[in-house]
Image (cartoon, rainbow, N blue to C red):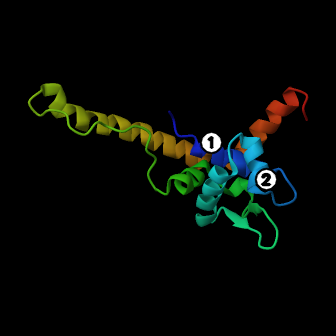
Amino acid sequence: MQDTRFSIAIHLLVLLSEVDAPMSSANMAQSVGTNPSFVRKILSSLKRAGLLKSHRGRAGFSLVQPAADITLLQIYQAVYNTNDVEIFAIHKNPSDKCLVGRYITPTLDDTFKGIRDATEQKMAETTLADCIADMRKMAKRDGVL
């Protein structure tokens, strides 16, 4: 099963950018199609990273900065609490007695580093505003907007 926290975090941030008033985690969970507890965990990570603020005295969250200033890389790093984008993991115990086993880890390290660097660059260039623009374009095409 693949981890969906990153896509859910983007969903939540886009949702918050599209509403005028702070939203509760229960309302957000309905949009995402998950439970409010899981949404609150993701919101907590986003808040800790400085991307969201919560509102005391009334339920809800809102963006701290404009969507154009929030990159997908920032969101990823907030959700996974890391500065590194981990796309692929390499198995831990290949045999040194085998030619492939001995050299597969450094081979894949180099290959995966290039993929990771390209992915990080694209994530750093893509903003939440880009996602919102794409979403609106699709909604307009489908006659929803």
* Pointer 2 residue: 17
Point out residue 31 in the picture as x, y percentages from the top left corner.
77, 42
- How far, Cα to Cα, is label 1 from label 2? 15 Å
Q: What residue is shown at x 18% (from left), y 32% (from top)?
A: 103
Image position of 81 (left or right of 97): right
* Pointer 1 residue: 7
For the residue labelled by badge 2, is the local secondary structure a helix, a strand or a loop?
A: helix
| Circle 2: residue type | Ser
- Please tell me how crowded label 2 is: few (under 14), some (14-19), or many (20+) other residues with Cα within 10 Å: some
Depicted 69 relative to depicted 88: above or below: below
For the residue labelled by badge 1, is the local secondary structure a helix, a strand or a loop?
A: helix
- Please tell me how crowded label 1 is: few (under 14), some (14-19), or many (20+) other residues with Cα within 10 Å: some
Image position of 106 (left or right of 68): left
Residue 144 visible in the current orientation: yes
**Residue 44 in which image quadrant:** bottom right
Q: How many marks?
A: 2
